[in-house]
């Protein structure tokens, strides 16, 4: 069994993939630009519910129109060899076929992170640096778990200027996916 990495461990993507295959079941690790980071495993229920709400809404809309896009939640890896990264975004939208048995993908169209106080700095800096290098990525959503507040960073301006959407009566526009997501749906059973 692999030993738990420390926060400052440095390694290659290839070595990390061998390590993570033997990781203890109660641990989750990411590789961010060659640095191994141990992730939180016991998230608050609100965090989990928001992730599932986003996944449900996206899947429902893709299914309704027969889209080839698929939604992956929390445990499917986003792999970036050029940046030596292997990440576990909360939500991944992928619109290309995957090889049978694939455990990661490299060309997401949209990503979402439910950003808690402890994960927000990494989501906004380190992970965003990796996400900016992905040519396929069009939208990156940062979702607050405690209030109806979503920031959307778009490929069009290099993921620099967030579009802020606040309030349960507003929608998040995702032009690359040809849809909008109501905040009321994102926060269903979490906020008022």
Image (cartoon, rainbow, N blue to C red):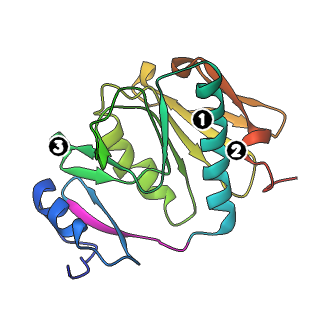
Residue 114 location in percent, x, y? 57, 53
Q: What range of the chain is rendered magenta?
A: 35-42
Q: Nearer the viewer, mark 2 or mark 3?
A: 3
Image quadrant containing the N terminus: bottom left
Residue highlighted by disc 3:
81
Q: Is residue 72 left or right of residue 7?
A: right
Give the residue at x 48% y 72%: 41
Residue 181 location in percent, x, y? 69, 31
> Which residue is nearer to you in this view: 123 or 58?
58
User: What is the distance, in whole Å, between disc 2 and disc 3 at their CAs?
Assistant: 32 Å
Please name the predominant secondary structure of the magenta segment in the image. Answer: strand
Q: Earlier in the sequence, mark 3 or mark 1?
A: 1
What number is the disc on residue 149? 2
What number is the disc on residue 59? 1
Q: Are marks 3 and 1 in contact (CB under 8 Å)?
A: no
What is the secondary structure assignment of the residue under circle 1? helix
Q: Earlier in the sequence, mark 2 or mark 1?
A: 1
Give the residue at x 51% y 67%: 118
């Amino acid at each position: 069994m692999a030993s738990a990495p420390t926060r400052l461990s440095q390694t290659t993507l290839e070595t990390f993939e061998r390590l993570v295959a033997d990781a203890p079941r109660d641990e989750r690790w990411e590789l961010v630009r060659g640095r191994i980071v141990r992730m939180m495993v016991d998230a608050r229920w609100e965090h989990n519910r928001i992730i599932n709400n986003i996944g449900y809404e996206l899947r429902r809309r893709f299914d309704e129109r027969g889209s080839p896009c698929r939604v992956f939640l929390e445990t499917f890896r986003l792999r970036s060899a050029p940046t030596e990264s292997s990440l576990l975004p909360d939500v991944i939208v992928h619109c290309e076929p995957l090889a049978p048995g694939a455990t990661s993908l490299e060309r997401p169209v949209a990503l979402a992170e439910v950003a808690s106080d402890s994960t927000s700095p990494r989501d906004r800096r380190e992970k965003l640096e990796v996400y900016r290098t992905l040519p396929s990525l069009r939208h990156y959503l940062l979702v607050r778990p405690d209030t109806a507040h979503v920031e959307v960073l778009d490929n069009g301006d290099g993921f620099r200027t967030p579009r802020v959407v606040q309030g349960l009566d507003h929608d998040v526009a995702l032009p690359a996916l040809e849809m909008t997501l109501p905040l009321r749906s994102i926060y269903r059973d979490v906020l008022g």
